[in-house]
Image (cartoon, rainbow, N blue to C red):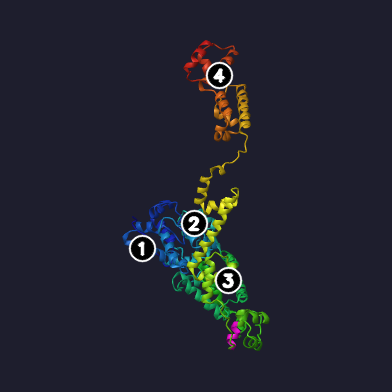
Amino acid sequence: MLRYFPASFPDETLYSRLCRYHRLSGQEVDRVSLHELIGGHTHVVVSDLPSKLDTLVSRLPNEANVSVDDIASNNTLLAFYTAFMPARRASSVYAAMRGDSASGIKMSIGLIASRLGGHNQLRFCRICAQEEYFTTGQPYWHRVHQLPGVLVCPVHKQTLCALAAETIELNRHKLLLPDDKAIAGHFDDIHLSDIQQETALRLALLSGDVLHGRMQTKGAEGIHRLHRSSAAAHGLIRANGRIRIDDLDQLIGLYCNCLPVNVEFSVVRCRLFDCALKLLRKPREAIVHPMLHIVLMDCLRYVEDRPNLQCAEAVPDMPLTSRARKIIDLSVLAEKLSFQGATLSGVAGVMGISVTTAAVEAARAGIRVSKRPKHITAERVTDVGTSLRLGLSIEEVAQKHAISIVSVYRILRMDAALAQEYEEKLFTLVREQYRQRYMDSRSDKAAYAWLRRHDGLWLTEQLKACPAMRTRKSCVDWRQRDTALAHHIVEIEAQLRSMPGKPTYISETKLKRLTSMADTIKHSLPNLPLTEAALKTCAESAQAHQRRRIMWAYCELKKRPDFHHQLWEVLRLAGVRKLHPSNEALAYSLL
């Protein structure tokens, strides 16, 4: 257990607190402090969503009065990323941070796929650092400065200094504060124009509100309602709930001109329109990066400050673009619907408008629209169910009862039991067809494959009843192959015995390998009796091989004038360490 742990400064990251502990402890090497804090020096402590929180808290002194919840809430970016996240996913992220490894956190919440905030980053404000020398005595890393998309200090309204990504990677196992000499010359100043800095400041303030809980998102449904209400307030939502896509595209195009072009905003510029459509439409389970939520909120709020768009909103019936609404002749609409009894689709086709527009305009004008007569009665539904239980196809049922194919499918969906019976009946009919095909022709490969997958028990019984049907004619002339392999083995043995130099051991494995058909011989040896006999005849035993080496060594030594006819000379040249009893008589007879 540690003897002390520094208290948290306002809005300080956990990484910054660990760095201050390392500096205050006086340790020269970072790995010693990491061992004391989290029990290992190879773990990378990131500034946004660190892990091993349980390990750290278990080592802190009781006087520190620090819990895992306090660290996660006040020293990490957990509140920022979980503000727009379902509660179930947020709890899994919190559990991973408490564990020993957080390698899958950023993958599970979509940071890697979004390319926003997936890497570790360290930023600080120079004015904040100067003030902290007098207030706290030490500059530190602020949480709000490490948020993705925050390029301006929300307090001093000045651009931040960012540590180069290469430097962060090289020092990923070190504990460094903003005034460390090791990174003094590796900070890059972020340069923005006036309009870009103004936009970045608004985004930083919004991000800070989300991080510190000053903005209540109320889950996915709440943030969806917030986006929709902001868009509707500026005429981007039609009366029927649809989005004015062209107007939204124009608005986002104008807004993107005010965004910075560096760091994460290069990705936002390319994806903001698609993301806005996703967030304004029906909410899905997919997780959207918080930065995209914040940028969209600022985009919809900033409409009020644009005079060219403000004028467009003065006319309530005119969209934001220069397109004019199509004027609909209500007299023609009323005549066709009320007096001629035409359908909405027919009227829409004649007038060149959509069915939805025709229905909306008719409702506004109070024109009564005749409902389509119902042809699907309860009696007909019963008749359709009877036909389906007989196994008729959908097309045959529709033609028999004079209804559409869509109506037949709708009747099937209304009755789950009927749908199951129909599926079982169709399967039975198809199975009988494939069984008959297989019985007519055992060579029908398609029928055999279907039965093997869906009716394996019946197929197995048929194969057992007619085993002769499974025999296949051999496509290999084993007699010819056996004779050729036997001759080849004899030739290989002769070549090996006639090779110059010290004799090599002629084994069955070597003979098989030199034929280039070792696998064939191994798996088909019962079909190759001549080959098997040739292998046993040509392969030599260990005693025979030793005898051949001794004879070769004796012949070689006889050519040398310094040969003293000693047994050890013959055995050394032959490479024989222990003479076999059966070869002793031969060895002594040569001397």
Q: Which mark is residue 406?
A: 3
Q: Is residue 45 left or right of residue 353?
A: left
Report the mark closest to the observer, 1 or 3.
3
Q: Considering the numbered disc 4 on the image, is that residue within a helix, a strand or a loop?
A: helix
Per the model, the C-alpha gap separating discs 1 and 2 is: 33 Å
Mark yes or no: residue 527 visible: yes
How far is disc 1 from disc 4 in space, using C-alphas? Answer: 83 Å
Residue assigned mark 2: 181
**Which residues lie in the magenta part?**
359-365
Q: Nearer the viewer, mark 4 or mark 2?
A: 4
Residue 221, horizontal then vertical, whole percent = 48, 73
Name the front one of labels 1 and 4. 4
Q: Nearer the viewer, mark 1 or mark 2?
A: 1
Separation of residues labelled 4 and 2 (CA atoms): 77 Å
Assess whether mark 2 and mark 1 are in contact (beta carbons under 8 angstroms): no
Residue neighbourhood size for the residue with mark 2, other residues' Cα within 10 Å, grouped as few (<14), some (14–19), many (≥20) = few
Dot 1 amino acid type: Ser
Rendered location of residue 256, percent (x, y):
60, 71
Q: Which amino acid is tagged 4?
A: Arg
Residue 67 is tagged as 1
Instruction: Kindly identify the residue that appears in the image at 54 percent across and 52 percent down.
Output: 451
Sequence-first disc among 4 and 2:
2
Tell me the number on the disc at residue 548. 4
Going from N to C along the chain, the mark reached first, 4 or 3, is 3
Kind of residue sitting beneath label 3: Val
Secondary structure beneath disc 2? helix
User: Label 1, label 3: how many angstroms apart (C-alpha)?
Assistant: 61 Å
Task: Determine the secondary structure under disc 1.
Answer: loop
Question: Quadrant of the image for the N terminus?
Answer: bottom left
Magenta segment, prevailing SS (helix, strand or loop): helix
Q: Amino acid at mark 2?
A: Lys
